Image (spheres, grey):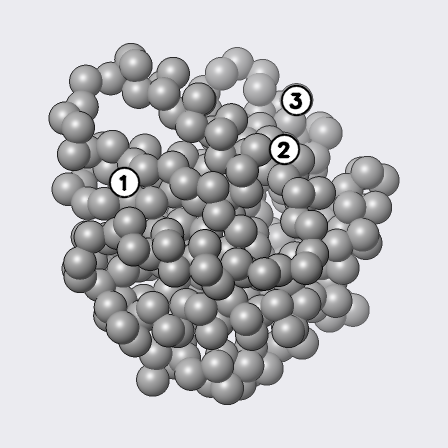
Amino acid sequence: MPDRDFSTISPTARGLLYMKAITTKIPYLWEAAELIMGTSGIDFECRYVSIDRAIDGLSINNFMELASGYSFRSLEMTRDRDCFYLDTDLPELIDSKRELAEAILSRESRVEGRLPRFLALNALDESAFDDACNVIPTGPICIINEGLLVYLDESEKRRLCALIYKILVERGGVWVTGDIYTRRPPDVIPRPVSSEVARFLAQHKVVENSFDSFESAMDFFAQCGFAAERHTADEVYDGLSSLEAARRLQPIDEEQLRARLNLRQTWVLRPQ
């Protein structure tokens, strides 16, 4: 069983839900969010869209998302394609999310087979992880995560890799992660954050938990048995709706923004 309490991470999921909302057309919502958070929404939209882009190229019908937070990719995916989607996170968060999803789905008309499943899961709990995978129909699985690895130290990352490797070898499939973060070099200006966010990042050692470089990340996953297909921020940059909104609001240092976004990549990982 995991010996660390990850519940302190959950409050950020609600904040990310607000950040993701800035890509909507609600009057002045983006302007208000931008004044509070700077260009944070661009970072998160870039990560989300890059994961979607990676998933689009897969011929897999079973999906499991780890630590999904208030991302509603599961609702979107089951609406637009015939697939099975297991949406997981810590108990308190997933219960709240299930209620939100039910309220959203009450406004739609869907057949029973086109609904996601919601399940409480600590992704580092081996027994619970195996039980969750047993819920998924036969066939290959695409395991998805965004915003998880930066909260895990190296030993915890290795534990997660071992669990995912085992199920993908048994079932077939891939792991799509948007969490290949590298540490900021001195010439890249950091994204402005509030004092509360700064304390949170320090508490959870987000910088320390990032990879030294993409090359060191590649070596780490190779040691864990994975080969990687890399997707960069440049592949989705020009189509980001939050970027267009930010440009309308104020001048942006595009070179620095690209440099910051390029500190993160989305990888499709396959067992070697």
Q: How dense is the environment of label 3, judged by Cα within 10 Å: few (below 14), some, or many (20 and up)?
A: few
Which of the two residues, 157 or 131, is positioned nearer the viewer here? 131
Q: Which amino acid does label 3 sit on?
A: Ala
Q: Which amino acid does label 2 sit on?
A: Gly
Using the rendered view, name the quadrant where residue 156 is placed.
bottom right
The x and y percentages for residue 250 are 65, 33
- Horizontally, is 218 left or right of 189 in the view? left
Residue for badge 2: 15
Residue for badge 3: 32
The x and y percentages for residue 176 are 39, 61
Element at badge 2? helix
Residue for badge 1: 77
- Horizontally, is 12 left or right of 227 in the view? right
Asked if one can make out residue 170 in the rendered structure from this viewpoint, the answer is yes
Question: Which is more foreground, mark 1 or mark 3?
Answer: 1
* Residue drawn at the location 51% of the way across and 26% of the way down: 96
